[in-house]
Image: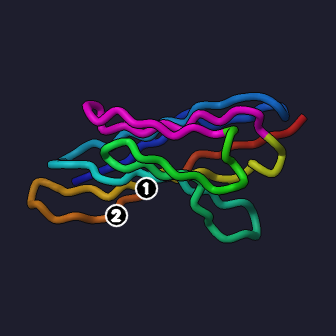
């Protein structure tokens, strides 16, 4: 069974920084694309950033220049470094990964979500 476990959320003041982590574990053969989404109250879930296994990255316009996505393939872990945080970044952040399991089937998996609150 494959799991994604997130950590690193919390309360931070505007202008501050947080680093989110998401580790995949279980019967994994290969982790392909890894992504971060967020969902604010009353809004749809939106894609924040994604990274391919080879390290190609893409970002939502709202976070370009402030957020950095990275990964450690040896640890099956993806990170989201968030700098210059704004109140509008407040949301539950979710990790998503496309994983080939031990049966060589690729599926999309989701983490449980971690709350990020930006407030003074």
Residue at image x 72%, y 60%? Answer: 40
| Disc 1 element | strand
Give the main secondary structure of the magenta stretch.
strand
Counting every numbered tag in the picture gives 2
| As drawn, 17 above or below 30 | above
The stretch in magenta equals 67-85
| As drawn, 38 above or below 17 | below
Q: Quadrant of the N terminus?
A: bottom left
| Disc 2 element | strand
Residue 68 on the magenta span: yes
Give the residue at the far left of this rendering: 103
* Residue 113 falls left or right of residue 71: right
Report which residue position mark 2 lands on.
108
Q: Position of residue 50 (x, y in %)?
A: 48, 52
Residue at image x 70%, y 52%? Answer: 91
Residue 52 on the magenta span: no
Q: Position of residue 109 (x, y in %)?
A: 36, 59
Disc 1 + disc 2, Cβ < 8 Å: yes
Give the residue at the far right of this rendering: 120
Q: Nearest the camera: 103 or 61?
A: 61
Q: Nearest the camera: 64 or 69?
A: 64
* Residue 5 falls left or right of residue 14: left
Report which residue position mark 1 lands on.
96
Q: Residues within 10 Å of mark 2 (few under 14, many from 20)?
A: few
């Amino acid at each position: 069974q494959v799991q994604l476990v997130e950590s690193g959320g919390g309360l931070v003041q505007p202008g501050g920084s947080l680093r989110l982590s998401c580790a995949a574990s279980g019967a994994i053969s290969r982790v392909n694309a890894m992504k971060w989404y967020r969902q604010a109250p009353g809004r749809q879930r939106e894609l924040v950033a994604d990274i391919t296994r080879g390290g190609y990255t893409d970002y939502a316009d709202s976070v370009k220049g402030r957020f950095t996505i990275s990964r450690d393939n040896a640890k099956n872990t993806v990170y989201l470094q968030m700098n210059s945080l704004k109140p509008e970044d407040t949301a539950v952040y979710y990790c998503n990964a496309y994983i080939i399991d031990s049966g060589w089937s690729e599926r999309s998996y989701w983490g449980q979500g971690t709350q990020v609150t930006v407030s003074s």
